[in-house]
Amino acid sequence: MSGTWSPRGFQEAWGQRPGPARTPPEVLPSGARNSGRARLERLVTRAPEVVIKISGRIHGRAQLKAHIDYISRNGQLDLEDDQGWALKGSAEQGERVADWAAEAQIDRRRNARSPLGHSLVLSMPGGVEAAPVHDAARAFARDTFGERHEYVLVLHTDSGHPHVHMVVRSHGLERQRFNPGRGELQAWREAFAARLRERGVEAQATWRFERGVTRRREPLALLKLEARRAAGEAARSWTWEGALHEAALAAFSKDTGSRPWEGAILNRQTRVRSDYLAAASQLAASPNVSDQVLGEQLKAFVLEMPAPDTRRLALARQLRRLHDDVSPSPSVAQTPDLAARSHLAVVEAVLTATIVDPALREEALAAARRRIAYWLERGASFTTARVKPDARDKDRSH
């Protein structure tokens, strides 16, 4: 069989797909290196995944100037615009900011609340040379935005992995808005990965579910809030407390049923694994030795895929481990009231995350167990309501 042969059914699922209407067709990858078989080869060899993310919207001249100063390191790094010209130093870069802001201000048809620009980051994992990443990002930006939106970009190499910052002007040259959807972002990732492969860098852009990854990354705003909480600068968010509450129900009560989205995740992963194994059988039946090797690699990949998981179930496992590590008082451990145990688990999780000092944390946990045991001995009934950290405990943690 030819080197570009694809297993039956995978060409439709893994080959070139129609891109979003706003993405020029020439941007989308094509050719033998983007066939279904080539994608399978990169999958089983775990080629590095490209990242393209929209890191924020930029409103007003002050925000645009601040962001340009940040990505240019206050003018120390040259920016490159959509015409390929270098903007050197703070003065030239400030002039571009002033131009964009002035043109937006005199545009009567523009909504005053709409952003001036969007900030993007294109990156690869560490270990990849910076020059091809920069060149691939430049080619991707030119093909994707060059005739539609003005932009500036700059390469950063000071964080352990090469990445390119871009600022794309929100209102296009023909008044089209910069408003990409999920499908368009994926098309951009595939296009960026193709530009990297053209420059000799192995890269891929697969969906999470194609790799067996079912948990989404936590939102950046939530991670920043948790970092502030860990530093003692903020309280735990209600989002996390609600997640702990749901996890406690799964860990300690009779609420063991799956949620609708968990069932959908399981069904999708079942189909993905079934398709992979079917493709592996087709490859194994091929007279081509390279096809047979790929089939064996694909089978091994399926066996190593992580089990479907969600945040609720992952937190439930953590609560169980936390509960097992901290021995409760006998009156609580032996009670049949599962709601009380769930309540205690939430209290323990919140206090553990809130109080940094080990001695104070253990004292607070012991007090919580004593309070719950006291009320259980008097026949109190517990509910699994959300629990706020005690203000006095929070004050003592500083």
Image (tube, grey):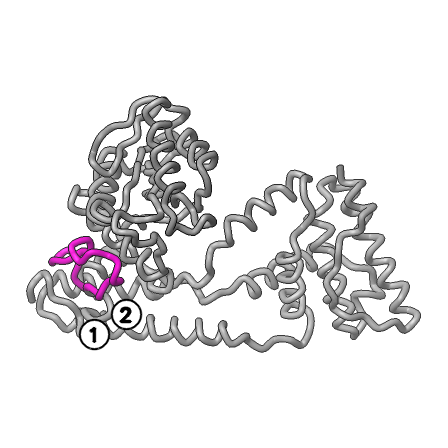
Q: Is residue 32 magenta?
A: yes
**Is 114 in front, or is 370?**
114
Q: Which mark is residue 276?
A: 2
Establish if 119 lies above or below 388.
Answer: above
Q: Which mark is residue 304?
A: none
Give amino acid for label 1.
Answer: Gly
Q: Position of residue 135 (x, y in %)?
A: 21, 37
- Label 1 sits on residue: 9
Q: Are marks 2 and 1 in contact (CB under 8 Å)?
A: no
- Give the residue at x 8% y 69%: 287
Q: Is residue 126 visible?
A: no
Considering the numbered disc 2 on the image, is that residue within a helix, a strand or a loop?
Answer: helix
Residue 203 visible in this rendered orientation of the protein? yes
* Residue range of the region highlighted in magenta in the rendering: 16-36
User: CA gap, disc 2 to disc 1?
Assistant: 10 Å
The residue under the point 90% across, 63% down is 374
Say which amino acid is labelled 2.
Answer: Tyr
Task: Estimate the x, y position of residue 74 in percent, counting from the top left.
Answer: 41, 24
Locate residue 77, reporting x and y percent: 33, 25
